């Protein structure tokens, strides 16, 4: 029996492995008039294996677009709605019923932010935040969703009156009237304290006091906290610890911190000399590696920390300096602003020539047999959509439809994209699901493209059959749930015996 238990427990932990550790998300702001449609955004997010997305409202089109993608959404109640949400429970009930429930759980909503950086608002609405949070929580409790969807509110670092040294971190006393009841709410409901952190701003405002390499995770020397003796090699950790010390100073020791915005702009006004693509890439790449390694901070070593990078797109309607419109990882046409890999293993860019490596001999790109079905499907959907590949040949009755399986279809499509985009290494990436081979994978009448020749055996009609795509999704999406059921069945049998 012990052997069976060890096997079942190990299997169960294996299934849950992808859920452990810190995660990296992305902020999907929409203050622009040139962004792609939400369904194309959802495809882009899946292609780059981004599993967590924050939006700032509960836009219906966005919620629909992310249905059945597995991407976890953080949605928001804007500051403009705090008055109505705080005054009447019925308003929160109606919002949840009309704007959230129709799309849940197909759209995986896990957090609701009530208000955003309220201390930075020009209107004195801070007293409305906690009542609004309570009403949203009550609405969730009525539906039994309060343990599945967490409620919190986001803050700027301005919520602190002091952040250096980190051990002296303290909340601004002028915010005490709403912060104390909010912290009590978070502790009681096991919700995180959400903070927006931008070392860029600290450097921009005090370039003589804040070394650029310290802001970019590249410091060659440490900053010492004189009270604790802890050594800090980057400003991000120092600011996170300042929050933790501020919480501990008020005796809130169980509340976790979550970073709901951080990033670096790739372009700015003439005075914003640090806003460059190189610095943006450096900051975000080092940030991702730092977080996914679960190194924690000097005051919280090994502590998991979930973060959301700001932002998915450049947003041309944001007010302020030029940098405010250039925080995106992608341009509105979905091409990369600079190279960035969310896995932390390196920088991968499928749109620029910066990292292109051509092979000196003929090669093809096929789907990896080790890739998961959902990753293959996401890459296939992207290639047949935004990737602009002619996917006719893998449709029913076409030369490459048989064998009718995801690996075979993806292989043909991946190779078409690969050849059409210069047969470069990055053009065969597909988020790690593509592999290069030197043996022609053509068979029967299914002829794989080669040497940049953009002729295929499938005709000229782009777009994969939605019926075929949905059938494939249905065929493979239940596999993980099936495995989980098997594991639970084993555990139940052990319990009974």
Image (cartoon, rainbow, N blue to C red):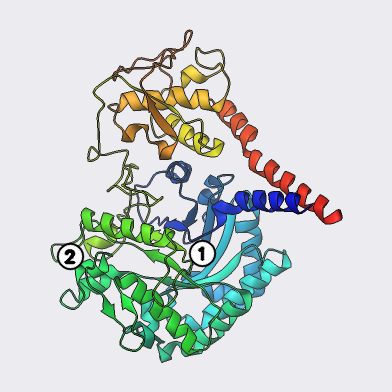
Q: Is residue 238 above or below residue 340?
A: below
* Label whose residue precedes the other's in the sequence (2 or 1): 1
Q: Badge 1 local density, few (<14 within 10 Å), some, or many (20+)?
A: many
Q: Is residue 200 above or below residue 124?
A: above
| Residue placed under numbered mark 1 in the picture | 76
Number of marks drawn: 2
Residue 298: image quadrant is bottom left
Q: Position of residue 410 (x, y in %)?
A: 48, 27
Q: Is residue 464 visible?
A: no
Label 2 close to label 1 by CB (< 8 Å) = no
Q: Position of residue 440 (x, y in %)?
A: 39, 16
Most foreground residue, 11 or 105: 11
Q: Regarding mark 2 in the picture, which secondary structure is present there?
A: loop
Q: Residue at x 41, y 27 (%)?
A: 414
Task: Give the foreground label among 2 and 1.
Answer: 2
Measure the C-alpha gap from mark 2 to mark 1: 31 Å
Q: Is residue 78 left or right of residue 426?
A: right
Q: Position of residue 169 (x, y in %)?
A: 38, 85
| Residue placed under numbered mark 2 in the picture | 272
Instruction: Give the label on residue 496, or none.
Output: none
Q: Is residue 141 left or right of residue 204?
A: right
Q: Is residue 309 visible?
A: yes
Q: Is residue 63 above or below residue 362?
A: below
Q: Position of residue 465 (x, y in %)?
A: 54, 25
Q: Residue at x 33, y 49 (%)?
A: 340
Q: Regarding mark 1 in the picture, which secondary structure is present there?
A: strand
Q: Is residue 411 left or right of residue 91?
A: left
Q: Badge 2 local density, few (<14 within 10 Å), some, or many (20+)?
A: some
Which residue of the protein is positioned furthest toward the top in this rendering? 444
Q: Residue at x 31, y 77 (%)?
A: 231
Residue 276: image quadrant is bottom left
């Amino acid at each position: 029996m012990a052997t069976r238990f060890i096997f079942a427990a190990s299997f169960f932990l294996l299934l849950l492995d992808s859920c452990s550790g810190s995660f990296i998300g992305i902020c999907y702001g929409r203050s622009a008039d040139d962004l792609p449609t939400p369904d194309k955004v959802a495809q882009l997010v899946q292609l780059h294996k981004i599993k967590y997305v924050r939006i700032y409202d509960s836009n219906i089109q966005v919620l629909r677009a992310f249905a059945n993608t597995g991407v976890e959404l953080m949605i928001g109640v804007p500051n403009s709605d705090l008055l109505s949400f705080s005054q009447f429970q019925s308003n929160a009930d109606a919002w949840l019923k009309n704007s959230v429930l129709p799309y849940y759980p197909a759209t995986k909503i896990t957090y609701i932010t009530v208000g955003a950086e309220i201390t930075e608002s020009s209107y004195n609405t801070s007293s409305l935040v906690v009542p609004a949070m309570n009403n949203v929580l009550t609405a969730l409790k009525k539906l039994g969703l309060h343990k599945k969807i967490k409620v919190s509110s986001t803050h700027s670092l301005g919520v602190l009156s002091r952040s250096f040294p980190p051990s002296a971190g303290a909340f601004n006393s002028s915010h005490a009237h709403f912060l104390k009841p909010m912290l009590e709410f978070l502790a009681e409901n096991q919700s995180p304290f959400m903070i927006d952190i931008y070392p860029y701003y600290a450097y921009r405002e005090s370039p003589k006091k804040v070394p650029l390499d310290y802001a970019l995770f590249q410091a060659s020397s440490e900053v010492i906290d004189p009270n604790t003796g802890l050594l800090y090699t980057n400003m991000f950790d120092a600011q996170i610890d300042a929050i933790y010390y501020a919480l501990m100073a008020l005796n809130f020791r169980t509340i976790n911190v979550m970073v709901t915005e951080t990033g670096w702009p790739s372009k700015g006004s003439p005075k914003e000399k640090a806003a460059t693509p190189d610095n943006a890439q450096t900051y975000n790449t080092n940030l991702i590696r730092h977080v996914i390694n679960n190194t924690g901070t000097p005051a919280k070593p090994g502590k998991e920390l979930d973060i959301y990078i700001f932002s998915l797109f450049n947003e041309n309607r944001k007010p302020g300096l030029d940098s405010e419109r250039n925080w995106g990882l992608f341009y509105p046409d979905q091409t990369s602003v600079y190279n960035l890999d969310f896995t932390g293993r390196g920088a991968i860019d499928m749109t620029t020539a910066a990292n292109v490596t051509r092979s000196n001999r003929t090669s093809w790109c096929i789907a990896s047999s080790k890739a998961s079905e959902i990753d293959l499907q996401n890459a296939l959907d992207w290639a047949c959509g935004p990737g602009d590949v002619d996917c006719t040949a893998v449709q029913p009755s076409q030369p490459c439809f048989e064998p009718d399986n995801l690996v075979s279809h993806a292989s043909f499509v991946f190779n078409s994209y690969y050849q059409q985009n210069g047969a470069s290494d990055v053009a065969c990436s597909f988020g790690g699901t593509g592999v290069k081979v030197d043996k022609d994978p053509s068979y029967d009448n299914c002829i794989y493209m080669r040497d940049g020749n953009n002729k295929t055996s499938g005709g000229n009609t782009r777009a994969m059959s939605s019926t075929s795509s949905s059938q494939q999704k249905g065929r493979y999406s239940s596999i993980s749930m099936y495995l989980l059921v098997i594991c639970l069945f084993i555990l139940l049998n052990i319990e009974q015996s």
